[in-house]
Image: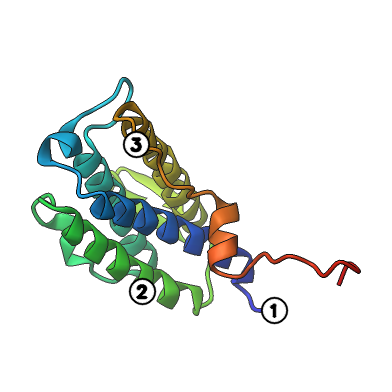
Amino acid sequence: MGLNDLLYDPIRHNNWATGSLTRFCLDRKLTAEQLEITGVGTYGGILATLDHIVRCDGSYLRRIVDRPLDYVDSDPATDLETIAGWNAEAGALWEVFLTQPIDVERVIVVDNNTRGTRVGIFIAQAINHANHHREQVCAILTGLGIEPPDIQAWEYAWESERIWDLAVDGR
């Protein structure tokens, strides 16, 4: 086992879930109106929320690895294809991150140089933040009468072969 193995599944699931939800919305060919509908207690519409998830993920990630992600500072995405591309770009950089030693105690200065926080908090926030907002998108989809995709860690495990059925004899 490697130094970062404990983080592989949570980080990969996080990126996979955002990508899966984005692809689900793309495959449903949601209208511009459907992409803008909000729900009670949601960040915004589907497009705005997915944009927010990917931008924030990129913002956390670029500070963790100290590498640029240009889309973080660009104009908001106007389509799901752009969001899918940005999520894939972040996924590739998360993979680079997972190959390097991680100092979870390293300090990152935030909030216009007024606060410091640890890398470990950035990792936790990236995962928690995305989960929170993905559920909002799923709630909007449900409100539209569309059954959202299963983006739980269990589904990720099936798709990535991190879970499997045992033979009848238990092996």
**Is 170 placed above or below 112 here?**
below
Q: Nearer the viewer, residue 15 or 143?
A: 143
Q: Residue at x 33, y 30 (%)?
A: 145
Disc on res. 170: none
In front of the other: label 2 or label 3? 3
Which of discs 3 and 1 lies nearer the camera? The answer is 3
Q: Residue furthest right?
A: 169
Please indicate whether residue 121 sits to the left or right of residue 82 in the image: right
Residue 147 relative to residue 40: left or right: right
Residue at image position (28%, 49%) is: 25
The part of the image, by quadrant, that contains residue 157 is bottom right
Q: Position of residue 166 (x, y in %)?
A: 79, 67
At 43% from the left and 54% from the top, the residue drawn is: 17
Per the image, label 3 sits on a secondary structure element best described as loop
Horizontally, is 77 left or right of 84 in the view? left
Classify mark 3: residues with Cα within 10 Å, few (<14), some (14-19) or many (20+): few
- Among the 4 quarters of the image, the one containing residue 35: top left
> Mark 1 — residue?
1
Q: Earlier in the sequence, mark 1 or mark 2?
A: 1
Q: Is residue 60 visible?
A: no
Residue on which the image places disc 2? 92
Q: Is residue 96 visible?
A: yes
Cα distance in 3D space between marks 3 and 1: 41 Å
51, 171: nearer the viewer: 171
State how far apart marks 1 and 2 are (Cα).
21 Å
Q: Taking 117 as reference, is 49 above or below it?
A: above
Percent position of residue 130, x then y:
40, 46
From the image, tell me which residue sits under label 3: 146
Quarter occupied by residue 58: bottom left
Three-letter code for the amino acid on which mark 3 is drawn: Ile
Q: Amino acid at mark 1?
A: Met
